[in-house]
Image (cartoon, helix red, strand yellow):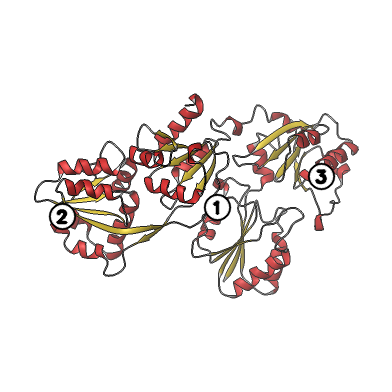
Amino acid sequence: MRVTLVGAGPGDKGLLTLKGAERIQNADIVLFDRLVCDEILAMIPDSAEAIDVGKNAGHHPVSQETINRLLMEKAKQGLEVVRLKGGDPFVFGRGGEELELLVENNIPFEVIPGLSSAIAGAAYAGIPLTHRDYASSFHVISGYGKNNESPNINYDALVRLKGTLVFMMGVARIGDICAACIAAGMDTSMPAAIVENATTNAQRKFLGTVETLPGIAYENFVESPALIIIGKVCQLSGPYDWFTKKPLLGKRIIVARAKPGVSKLSDDLRELGCHVTELPSAKIIPLTAPGCLLEKKLETINSYSWLVFTSGIGVHVFFDYLLERGFDIRALHHLKIACVGAETEKEINKRGIRAAYRPAEYNGAALAQGLSGLIKSGERALIARAKDGDENFTRILTDSCVDFDDLAIYEKIYKAKKFSFPNADFATFTSSSAVEYFADTAGDFDFKKIKAVCIGRSTAATAKSYNMDVYVSAEATIKSMVNKIKELCVYGN
């Protein structure tokens, strides 16, 4: 039994602490805020209950009192409770209030700090909050008080300190804030900035002065969450700006995932500045219960000459099962290993094994055709793959009179949820099953509007069957897919 307040940071998934991620992944229940990004929410285990307790300014569907009570009640049930908060729990996060009831009831708790947007947002805008030539201090101020009232701020004292002023949650009162600074004696030409959606790939930054910034914010329809920064250090935002130099900043990419875990494609695209919408991956169900078909096939493994994998998932499931069962991997020494694609081959290599065959093209048909010429008469292949795998793969082997057993070692269960994909520049697909999943979740979407970047010809053929505008990466690798997107962004069609 424990409650952990976890600071999720300002928006960029990479700014979440390792300890915070660990607590999320081991939680029984997670109560999360509005501004926690989808990538962090995806870390919540399927077995955990997730409760949205997010609040907008002036609109609190779940009251603070209810949140406090839920934390106490769930902890009393013996659960590992995570309260997931944007930014840092103790920096205008009401974390102190949420601990009061826990302390009164002797409930164990822990606080894991998060990176506040007051600091991270300035850094992503190229603004050093302190600088020996401009400011020896910085001050973080809330833009509104309790019960959404105007806060009681001593602007005279703040202006006299001559430090950098950072106003959080103040975009709705930016006119009053700037006017109060000027009334307290601040020079009207003092540099100022406002940063919207800081640290995310939807970030926007606008520069001005304490006099002109309110008008700039209104003209550009700046909305919460936004950070107001006032001080001489803002003039460094131009030369120190690194975030807006990302080559694909603002491009909107859909990543349709076919397997769970961290998506390297998504991470690589985000690093380049893309706004990534990631379709939740399928849930992988290993078919490895006691008495399963894999157990029986391993009893006769000496009757096979080839072991074939059509995905990295299959490699994981197969070798994880061997490890759990205590199977001596040396019993596979006589087998030749075949696989499709460089990513699957990497998973095999991680086990200290080299593949005997991988086709140059990333598709099941190429693998089947290659094996048809390699598997000799009298040899038999064991194909370890997903349930309901590509029928064309086994048809080619059958037509070539290859002796094989098609063994389902896992199945993929997709969440039945519809998604919308407004204004996407590209959709990316690393398998035909990812295309099918995308099509199922897109509903009545006009697929002709989709520019599909695919990892191989087989995947591309599936995308073309839905009338998508298809582009194929030069190689069957994530790096090549990213390069194709760069190429399309620079040179167009």
Marks 1/2 in contact by CB < 8 Å: the verdict is no
Counting residues from the N terminus, which is met first, the one under dot 1 or under dot 2?
Answer: 1
CA distance for labels 1 and 2: 44 Å
Counting residues from the N terminus, which is met first, the one under dot 2 or under dot 3?
Answer: 3
Would you say 422 lies left or right of 432 here?
right
Q: Is residue 217 above or below residue 311?
A: above
Amino acid type of the residue that numbered disc 3 sits on in the rendered structure: Arg
- Characterize the local packing of mark 2: few (<14), some (14-19) or many (20 or more) Cα atoms within 10 angstroms: many
Residue 374's x, y, as percent?
A: 15, 42
Amino acid type of the residue that numbered disc 1 sits on in the rendered structure: Ile
Q: Which residue is mark 3?
A: 173
**Residue 279, visible in the rendered structure:** no
- Characterize the local packing of mark 3: few (<14), some (14-19) or many (20 or more) Cα atoms within 10 angstroms: some
Q: Which mark is residue 304?
A: 2
Q: Which residue is mark 1?
A: 40
Amino acid type of the residue that numbered disc 2 sits on in the rendered structure: Tyr
CA distance for labels 3 and 1: 30 Å
